[in-house]
Image: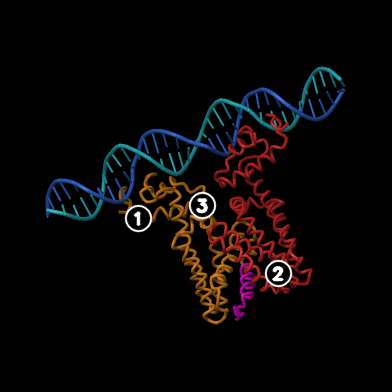
Chain colours: A red, B orange, C blue, D cyan
Amino acid sequence: MATTAYHHGDLRRALVAEARGLLAEAGVQGMSLREVARRAGVSQTAPYRHFEDRGALLEAVAAEGFGSLARYTAERAAGGRSARSRLRRGSLAYVEFAMSNPDLFRLMFSGPEFHESAEARASYRAWVELITDAQASGDLAGGSTGRKARSLWSLIHGVADLAVNGHLADEEWPRLAGAAVDTMLTGMGLTGMGA
Amino acid sequence: MATTAYHHGDLRRALVAEARGLLAEAGVQGMSLREVARRAGVSQTAPYRHFEDRGALLEAVAAEGFGSLARYTAERAAGGRSARSRLRRGSLAYVEFAMSNPDLFRLMFSGPEFHESAEARASYRAWVELITDAQASGDLAGGSTGRKARSLWSLIHGVADLAVNGHLADEEWPRLAGAAVDTMLTGMGLTGMGA
DNA sequence: TGTACATCAGTGAACGCGCGTTCACTGATGTAC
DNA sequence: TGTACATCAGTGAACGCGCGTTCACTGATGTAC
C-alpha cells in the first residue's frame, strides 16, 4: 500500500508536506511543482488531480503554516502563570516560529491570497483570546479588545519580519521582543508585573 | 542627445527608474531585465554594462526605495510641533509609503541582501534621530535610545506589513497606526499628550 | 587643428533552461445486481 | 460470490514560454602628440 504506483492514498497531504520541506530548502522560487511531485514519488502531473495549479498548492502550504503557528503560540502561551506572562510567551513564540521557518513565514505574509483560510483566521483569533483572557482576569482594562489584539500582533509581527529579514541581530531579537511587548502592555495599562 | 542609440548618458539611473515602475506594475516576478531594457529603449544586453545581474538591479531599486522612504518619513515627521506629534507623523508616513508602494516595500524587506545599502542604514537612523530628538526635548526618558527606536520601528513596520498584505482593513490601519504608536509611547513614559 | 588609438557603452544573435500546464491515456477501486 | 461498468487517481509525452545570460561585435567618445 505504501509504494503502489496508483492510488497513493493520501497524496494531497503528502504533496503539502513535501512542498513545505522544499520551501524550507529552496525558498518560494525553488518550490516547483515538478520537484514536489518527484519527492512524493509521483508523476509530474499527479498534483493536478489535487490542486488547480501551483498557486493553489502554495495556498495550502500557507494555510498549514498558519495552523502550525497558531498551535505553537497557543501552546507556549498556555504555559504562563499570569496574563502578562502568557502574552509575553505567546509573542516570543511567534518570533521563534518565524525564525525557524523563514520562507514559510514569508510566504504566509506575502499577499492577500494567503490568509483566506480557516487556519489564518484561527491564528488571529489566538491574539484576541489572549487579550480577552487578560481582560477577564482583571489585569487589563476592558474594551476595544480587537484594537488591542491587533496592536500587539502588529508589534510582534514587526519584530518577526525584521528579524527574519536580517534587520535585527540574532542576539537582540529575543530581548527586543520581550522588552517591546512589556512596554506596549504597560502602555495599555496592564497590571501585575510578575514574569 | 535624448535618443541617440549609443551612449545614453544616464542609463544606469534610467534603468533603476524603469525597474521601479515595472515593479509597481507587475511585482518582483514581473520585473524582467528584458522588459526594463525595452522600456529604457535599449537592447536587452545593455543593462549588463551597469549591473552584474538581475539581482544587482533589484538591490539598486531597493536601495532607492529606502532612500525614498527615509526622505518621506523625515519630511512628514518634521511637520510636527511636539516630539509626540513628530513620532506619530513619521510612523503614519511609514505605513502610507508602504501602502502606496506595496511591491517596492515587499522587495525592500524580502531578504538580508536588500538592506546593505547606505540608504537602508539612513532609513533606520531616521528612527534613532526621532527618539534622540524626543529625549533631548525632555519629553522622553533618556537611555537605550537604540532599543526604543527598534521597538517603535518594529511596531510600525508590523502595521505596515500587515496592512500591505491585506490583514488590516483599509479604513483601520491609519487609526491603528496612530493608536498603537500612542500606546507604545505611553508605555515608554513619554509626556506631553498634545497632538 | 588633425590624426591615431585606447576605451567605453552599446548591439544582436544564440543557447539552454526547467518550468507550468494540457492532452489523451490506463490501471485500480467500488458498487449495483 | 461474480460480473459489468462507472469513476477515480494516476501516467508520460509534448508544447510553449519568456527569460537570464554569454559571446563576438561595432559605433561613439576622449586624449596624446
Q: Indicate the position of residue B60 as horizontal and vertical percent values.
A: 43, 56
Q: Nearer the viewer, residue B40 or D8?
A: D8
Q: Which label was assigned to residue A195? A: 2
Q: Is residue B179 magenta?
A: yes
Q: Nearer the viewer, residue A19 or A168?
A: A168
Q: Secondary structure at mark 1?
A: loop
Vertical relation: A159 (above or below) B140? above
Which circle's residue, 1 or 3, is located before the other in the chain? 1
Q: Which label was assigned to residue A70? A: none
Could you tell me how far apart the alpha carbons at marks 2 and 1 are, in whole angstroms?
59 Å
Could you tell me how far apart the alpha carbons at marks 1 and 3 are, in whole angstroms?
23 Å
Q: Indicate the position of residue A96 as horizontal and vertical percent values.
A: 63, 57
Provide the residue span drawn in magenta.
B175-195
Q: Which label was assigned to residue B25? A: 3
**Residue at the disc numbered 1:** B10
Mark 1: amino acid: Asp
Q: Is residue B145 visible?
A: yes
Q: Quadrant of residue A42?
A: top right
Q: Nearer the viewer, residue B92 or B129?
A: B129
